[in-house]
Amino acid sequence: MIEMKLEGLRELSKQLQLLPERVARNALRSAVYAGASVVRKAMKARAPVATGKLKASVYQKQIREHSNLYTQVFFVGIRSGARKKRDGSKDFSRDAWYWRMHEMGTSKMAARPFVRPAFMAVHEEAARAIATKLADRISEETRRS
């Protein structure tokens, strides 16, 4: 799993603490969502497109169990459930269960990574997106009140 922690945003953090809890949580959540979206789009752009299922399986979601007022956690990953047997239906599984084979390779297939290179290519852009969105949301909320 790849983690990205932002530190050094002290001014924004202080301004965030001045806002009401609900507003601060929503501002932080939307900012981290913006950063996760940058990573998700990069992963989709680099995903192999043989059937399009792998590209369609890239998703992002908030992990509420690990999120609180001043910490928001989002997961950007690939749906990779168990492979289902064909039962005569057209689309028997939407999960790209084989993504690890592309990313890590196998004993008979060389690795063709796309997740790690996508993250490494855009992690600075994602950090800027988070900081920009957070600053915008804080200024918007302070204008309202």
Image (cartoon, helix red, strand yellow):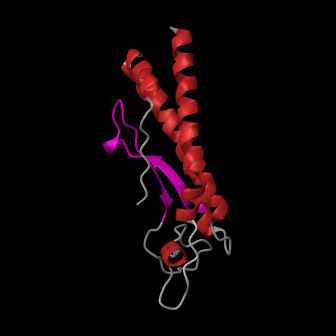
Report if residue 37 is visible in the image. Answer: no
Q: Is residue 61 above or below residue 20?
A: below
Which is more toward the observer, 52 or 94?
Answer: 52
Residue 105 shows in the view: yes
Residue 67 x, y percent position in the rendering: 35, 39
Q: In the image, is residue 65 part of the stretch drawn in magenta? A: yes
Magenta-drawn segment? 56-79
- Kindly identify the residue that appears in the image at 53 percent across and 80 percent down: 86
Q: Where is residue 81 drawn, in percent x and y?
A: 44, 68
Name the residue at the top extreme.
145
| Count of numbered tags | 0
Residue 50 in the figure: left or right of residue 64: right
Magenta segment: does it hold 72?
A: yes
Q: Residue furthest front?
A: 8
Q: Position of residue 115 (x, y in %)?
A: 54, 64
Which picture quadrant has residue 25? Answer: top left
Q: Which residue does the image show at 42% across and 22% down from the upper left?
A: 16
Which x, y percent locates residue 38? 60, 47
Q: Quadrant of residue 70?
A: top left
Q: Going 46% across and 34% down the picture, which residue do you hit? A: 29
- Report the residue at 40% width, 21% height from top: 14
Q: Nearer the viewer, residue 73 or 91?
A: 73
Q: Which quadrant, please, contains the N terminus?
A: bottom left
Q: Is residue 120 above or below residue 33?
A: below
